[in-house]
Image (cartoon, coloured by chain):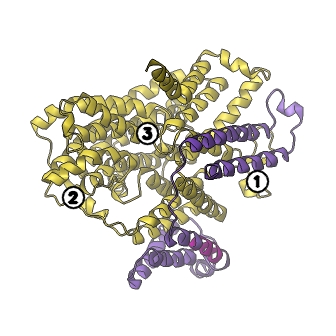
Chain colours: A purple, B yellow
Amino acid sequence: MRFLTIPGVIVAFSVTVIWAALQLELSPAMIVGESMQPRAFPILLMVLNIVLAGLLAFQYRSTPPKKIRQEGLHAWGSIALFVVFYLITIYVDMMIAISVVMFAMCLLWGERRIHVAALVALVTPAAVFLLFDLVLRVRFPRGLFTNWYYG
Amino acid sequence: MLDPYLVFLILATTVLGVIIGVLPGLGATTGAALLLPFTLTMEPVHAIAVLATIYVSATFAGSITAILINTPGTPAAAATTFDGYPLAQRGEAGRALGIAVVSSTIGGVFSVMVLCIAAPMLARVAYQFRPPEYFALALFGLSMLASISAGGTVKNLIGGVFGVWLATIGAERATGIERFMFGNYELYEGLGFVPVFIGIFAISELLMQSEKVNQVIETIKMKAVKLPSRDDYKRIWKTVARSCGIGTFIGILPAEGATIASMIGYSEARRWSKNKEEFGKGAIEGIAGAEAANNAATGGAMVPTMVLGIPGSGTTAVILVGLMVHGLRPGPYLFTQQVDTVYQIFGAMLLANLMFMVIGLYASKWFARISLVPRQMLWPMVFALAMIGAYSLSSSLLDVWIALIFGVIGFLARRHGFAVAPIAVGLILGEMVESNLQNSLKMFDGEWWLILTQPLAALFLAFAFLGLCGPTIFRWILKRGD
């Protein structure tokens, strides 16, 4: 039954989208005219996706997919760091979040020299921040660091 | 074209493009997606020249690592490893790189010349296109996703359909009805292309690279790059000429790119060679065939991108977004209303091809060392660039979250053998498919089958059908013949 996992996920996603599309408002006939309702096109796409998922299941049945090698700490740890990045950005500051995540990512991926990881995590965001702030005039969201920087 | 600032910009970007091309995992598409936010304050022509130069130079630079460390810097250089690395192992790395540089330059220059001639001609034809033709053309572009290199036919189509669906998020253009926004009004204009691209190309690659940190990279030492000898030229000129044609033609086909071009260029070089037994052991025709074809595809891929608004590859999808971000509307009118801009972009590509030849000949040795940058330092830097870049376009944190979410989606997709380029192409073509279908239905009073009565639309739909079912029908015929 392993061959049904991925097609099953695709079908479940498509059915969810079709359900969500059916909840959309209907546009008055005088606006739509002979064209289609806004819900029609996404439904059409998802029906197509279900057909393609069926074909994929058929393919997987004759040629089972290769067993996916389980990712180790690096990939899932990096995804966990994205969550940390989100939390620090929301509650502290985006630039600080980038530095913290970069530092942690360097260590997670195997950098043993803490001073090198710290240097990379401080210099890169600082350089990119200054470039975007001074040259490209991008204002970053307010937080602990940007409040101090912007005043 | 003689604008000194533009020339300086192309030179600097060529160096940057070569660096991007040799860095492990970073390629033309990821590089262009990461650099797009940096071009925001530039003049449109400068911005597109920067992106086009990255495309051209990173595509070439993939060959440096392919030859010296047996790791293609970009997928398009995969075929170069077959003979480039064995030749380098025999102590002829300089010769291998020389052949790669010269073949790439010839391929690139040839394709820019074809671009200069073919694009305005195609634009003239495209003036006659109405909604049915554009709808059929977009479907043809999507059908070509079936045959792009990674993934498989069905998986690529699923990715393409998912991309088209992503384009429906936001307010529907004709009626203003909100679709799949779930109360988030920042999505009213739809999903931003830039954060999605940064997510699926850069962040997903970051996660893929996280599992390769322990890979040991060893580079082959060499003294200097050698220009091909007269005998070398005699051996490769036919291969280079053939690959120029193949690469440009493959590039022009919607959604096909340099990777397929280089594979076909390589296999054709082998098929026509008198020294077939040398292939895989360091045949110079193998290097020339792959390299001329992959760089010839760069100019070819710009033809449908600029004339029809249909990206010819993942990188041209990013360039297309660059055109839109800078207020240039891809399509035939670009060739009448912004003709100076168009030719400056073509000129920039030509100049980039010549500049990477100089850089390739004199500095390949040094650039190869850049590929030894530890992944545990490189990819956290990419993370910083990606996050700040995703934020900067609309100064919106939502874009940062979108980049992260699509990074994880892209990673999971790639883990299960799905390519991410079809999602990007689908996202770009989504609006074109839906709006032209709606307009066609209005034109024909809801009778959709009348689209088939339009000769050009019917031709594109026939091509789409052949693109999807042709290989299966062909295999079936062959089977019956047996």
Task: Residue A127: say if magenta.
Answer: no
Q: From the image, tell me which residue sits under label 1.
A: B181
Q: From the image, tell me which residue sits under label 2.
A: B365
Q: Which mark is residue B257?
A: 3
Q: Amino acid at mark 1?
A: Met
Tell me where the magenta segment starts and ends, as one range: A81-89
In this rendered view, identify the residue nearer to me: B171 or B213. Answer: B213
Q: Amino acid at mark 2?
A: Lys
In this rendered view, identify the residue nearer to me: B329 or A19. Answer: A19
Residue drawn where x is 23% and y is 40% of the image: B279
Regarding mark 2 in the picture, which secondary structure is present there? Answer: helix
Q: Quadrant of residue B407?
A: bottom right
Same chain, marks 1 and 3?
yes
Taken as a whole, is the magenta stretch helix, strand or loop?
Answer: helix
Q: Are marks 2 and 3 in contact (CB under 8 Å)?
A: no
Q: Chain of mark 3?
A: B
- Give x and y (percent) for residue B239: 24, 31
Q: CA distance from mark 2 to mark 3?
A: 27 Å
Q: Amino acid at mark 3?
A: Gly
- Give x and y (percent) for residue B142: 58, 35
Residue drawn where x is 76% and y is 20% of the image: B444
Quadrant into which the N terminus of chain B falls: top left
Q: Chain of mark 2?
A: B
Local crowd at mark 1 within 10 Å, few (<14), some, or many (≥20)? some
Q: CA distance from mark 2 to mark 1?
A: 51 Å
Regarding mark 1 in the picture, which secondary structure is present there? Answer: loop
Q: Quadrant of residue B234?
A: top left
